[in-house]
Amino acid sequence: MALAFDEYGRPFIILREQDQKTRLRGIDAQKANIAAGKAVARILRSSLGPKGMDKMLQGPDGDVTITNDGATILEQMDVDNQIAKLMVELSRSQDYEIGDGTTGVVVMAGALLEQAERQLDRGIHPIRIAEGYEMASRVAVEHLERISQKFEFDVNNYEPLVQTCMTTLSSKIVNRCKRSLAEIAVKAVLAVADLERRDVNLDLIKVEGKVGGNLEDTELIYGILVDKDMSHPQMPKQIEDAHIAILTCPFEPPKPKTKHKVDIDTVEKFETLRKQEQQYFDEMVQKCKDVGATLVICQWGFDDEANHLLMHRNLPAVRWVGGVELELIAIATGGRIVPRFQELTPEKLGKAGMVREKSFGTTKERMLYIEHCANSKAVTIFIRGGNKMMIEETKRSIHDALCVARNLIRNKSIVYGGGAAEIACSLAVDAAADKYPGVEQYAIRAFAEALDSVPMALAENSGLQPIETLSAVKSQQLKENIPFYGIDCNDVGTNDMREQNVFETLIGKQQQILLATQVVKMILKIDDVISNSEY
């Protein structure tokens, strides 16, 4: 790009390869960007809430994903437009930070852009709109803080946590058994949570799935589940009070690093070689026996000779266990991962109350359960389902529920769902608009209107009359000054979200409003788009 001046001294810009570039500027650029953002939001709008629709996405290699999770839908979509990519990143950052509310945040951003377009048509400067949005978001976040309620729970009384997780799961495909899944998620989080520091490490919760059985068969295992079986079919299938040696060295004779050739010209030499090999194996197995191991879990394979010996020496073994699983087993059993046989000592063994092999269905697929561990800080959620897509979607739903439980442990405040919080904020922002002189108040009112889009979408997706329902709930909130009234999506017959037990985390809602406002401000500030043309 170069700057030149004509004969009257007026500057103009010369673009390199100008004929191959398209350039949008001023109001056209903003309108084009807003249209792109709205298009993405429109896709997700129909999948909001408990009656929201699922989307079916086909990947480049033909694999199909059916999901209701906003972040997953946008991740899988092949988006070209740069502004649409911003919306994808918006939902991803909500997913990383909060884990839930990924659809709502995009719908919210889309509504803000739609309102901004109307303000631009009125001739209001985009920066003034952005500033108005910033003021309004501050008012909304403060108001959320005021209407939030503290939840008291402890390890024995975790019902409040379960209720909040059920709200998250009610919009997913698994909502028919949301109670049991919510309980599983809460128990898993409480098992690994450090309640004093108010911290939860979700890496300690392993989510494993297996096709077959019902969704109701999903269970929580206080221990680790490994998709492997004993290396020899005649090894014992159940070991009580197991002492586990966790090895990352292979059960095979050492190989020289250099190229070598062994000449064997007599039977005696071959016998000597075989005996030598057998002696190696003998020593290895004996080392494991000497330190008191009753089960060996190995990252690598071992050849048939070693397998045969292990079986004869009554030392059950599992081979080809992945690195991540090994680490989890080590955390759960309190053992150490041993890289060399020479370093095996009794202190490095992990301890588990029960190790058992369980087979499933007629296919006789087997999995290994390691339970009653010394350190129960690692747990596994084992999901069953009719097909692979169902299991994948259940995994995503469980992840959302785990994140909600984690957020509640971090911050005990909740607000009411069903659009109740948004309607309350909309009323507060609308009331605050009068305090601001100047053009910003138009933007602040527009923000209040945009907040109504979430309850409006909820009503629309539930097959209710959107405008009628929203205005009824809004007037009820205004009249009684109670921020608990929301959209009755499930047709229970009451708008009171306390009775319906529809809760959402405060930090999740605040994050939604802040992130959506930031992205919209960023989009409004762009007034010149230079891009390579299509051909």
Image (cartoon, rainbow, N blue to C red):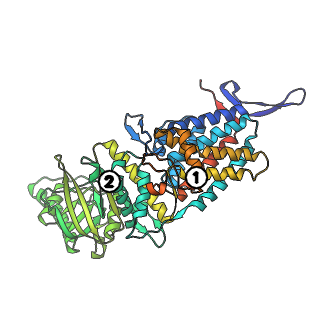
Q: What is the crowding at mark 2: few (fewer than 14 residues within 10 Å), some, or many (at least 20)? A: some
Identified by mark 2, the residue type is Glu
Identified by mark 1, the residue type is Gln
How many angstroms separate mark 2 from mark 1 (CA)? 44 Å
Residue positioned 77% across, 33% down in the render: 2
- Mark nearest the camera among 2 and 1 is 1
Instruction: Report x, y in % for residue 254.
Output: 26, 60
Q: Residue lying farthest right? A: 8
Left or right: where 3 falls relative to 271: right
Q: Residue lying farthest left? A: 267
Residue 387, located in which quarter of the rendered image?
top left
Foreground: 245 or 271?
245
Residue positioned 52% across, 41% down in the render: 457
Residue under label 1, please give it: 477
Instruction: Report x, y in % for residue 414.
Output: 51, 60
Residue 347 seen by the camera:
yes
Q: Give the numbered dot on residue 99.
A: none
Foreground: 478 or 432?
478
Above or below: residue 6 compared with residue 398: above
Residue positioned 58% across, 60% down in the render: 147
Residue under label 2, please give it: 208
